[in-house]
Amino acid sequence: MKLYNPGGERGSAMSYAALLEKIEIMRSTLRWATRIERPDIEKLLRQANTLRDEVMGLSHKERFVQAIGAERRTEASAEPAPLELSTGERRQALLARSFVFEGTFGDNPKLLDALEIAEKAAPTDLPVLVDGESGTGKELMAKVIHANGARADKPYISVNCGAIPDNLLESELFGHKRGAFTGADKDRKGKFESAHKGTIFLDEIGELPLIGQVKLLRVLQSHEIQRVGSDETISVDARIVAATNKNLRKLIETGTFREDLFYRLSVIHVTLPPLRERRDEIPLLIAWYGDESAEALKRRPVALTPRLRSFLLGYAYPGNIRELRNIMYRISCLAGETADLAHLPEDIRPAAPGAIATPDGTASAAGISMAEAKRVASDEAERSCLERGLQEVGGTVAELARRWDMNRSHLQILLKKHGLHSKDFRKEH
């Protein structure tokens, strides 16, 4: 998908994704500007956000027009099947197709599998079931599906099925008429009506009681609801994305989840791997949530001591991405300019100053020399990753930052730390 760039060379075109990348760089630059007053920065950020949303809207509207043409061209051509792509090339291909990542990043093959399924499912109205451990980003995947679909500019409604009391479940999902029960002093829309023409995300679907499952199945079959206390049927057109951290097949065996509802919801099935199987994403997530928490707290990003960074890279994160995010927010809130092990939550903090993280996420005491060895190993791994990345992109820092979804200035800092120069990796060398 291309957007005309009148200022470019020979009236060149840029992709929507490239334009969004430029907007993100501008927002990041504004966020930490030192010569602009904070109210002016916030005003400019709001304007940048509005521009970004407008560009995303244009991308969504045109993507499907171009997709039809691309499909026809593909059917007409008799070209051989493409060669298998590397993980970096797969992610770059998604970016080139103006795929909206919604904050998901990393080149983990399992994650890319899930994103590619999401890309194919997004333009359809088929129900999607997302499963995975708690904190793996299931709602984020639901937002990815919504953002890349034809309903992107319509409502996105999230429902936590496990947080609704049984006696309020029907009213919460389908609404009620005035006087339907004690306290119903006016008509009220339910979540399905609010999601009409958009997407409804049913989180923790495994917690839905059987009576609620029956009513949800009826909606899936008829696309109609009835408010509590009303005989009138209301047509609803909502794309359903459900999520669970439980094994629904085992719940079916125990009789606590309906088999027919499972097959209705899992037309498209996406499984998200836990963070311990996506360890290559941890440095990216640390940088991402470090910046995000700093922005939320209206302060500059906190620097991490080598031993804290070593711990964060080695920790097992049983709470997955959600736990990592919470840790970074805690660090940003409690630390001054530099954060250390003392700013970690007490229940995961190493027991001694020289302790380091073990692969299972526990802390073991070690001498200073061992801690130093761990720091050196971490730095060597970081340098090796940077070198490999620069080689893949031919020394183009902007391209590497885009692939890793990193702030380019932060990437430059890492390169400077290790004495790496992008020009040494350019293809002519």
Image (cartoon, grey):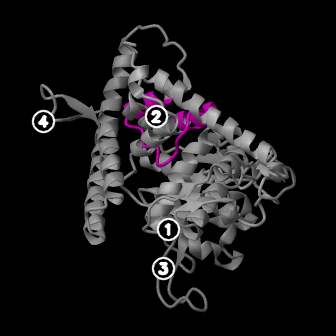
Name the quadrant of the C terminus: top left
| Location of residue 88 in the rendering, given as x and y in whole percent from the top left corner | 51, 27
Mark closer to the chain start, 2 or 3: 3
Q: Position of residue 32 (x, y in %)?
A: 36, 58
Which quadrant of the structure image shows residue 217? bottom right
Q: Which residue is mark 4?
A: 6
Q: Which mark is residue 188?
A: 3
Q: CA distance from mark 4 to mark 1?
A: 52 Å
Label 3: state its secondary structure. strand
Identify which amino acid the numbered label 1 is placed on. Answer: Thr
Residue position marked by numbered label 1 in the rendering: 233
Question: Would you say the residues marked 4 and 3 are in contact, meaning their CB atoms lie under 8 Å apart?
Answer: no
Q: Residue at x 30, y 66 (%)?
A: 42
Q: Give me the C-alpha separation between circle 4 and circle 3.
A: 49 Å
Badge 3: how crowded within 10 Å, few (<14), some, or many (20+)? some
Q: Nearer the viewer, mark 1 or mark 2?
A: 2
For the residues labelled 3 and 1, the Cα–Cα distance comes to 15 Å
Do the CB atoms of the residues marked 2 and 4 lie less than 8 Å apart?
no
Q: Can residue 121 be seen from the camera position used here?
A: yes
Q: Residue at x 41, y 25 (%)?
A: 395
From the viewer's side, name the closer residue of 241 and 272. Answer: 272
In the image shown, does 8 or 365 lie closer to the viewer?
Answer: 365
Q: Is residue 221 visible?
A: no
Left or right, 45 with reference to 255: left
Give the mark, 1 or 2, whose residue is nearer the N terminus.
Answer: 1
386 shown above or below 133: above
Which residue does the image show at 72% across and 43% down from the upper left?
A: 372
Point 52% across, 63% down: residue: 337
Measure the C-alpha gap from mark 2 to mark 4: 26 Å
What residue is shown with label 2?
Answer: 403
Q: Which residues are magenta?
A: 91-116
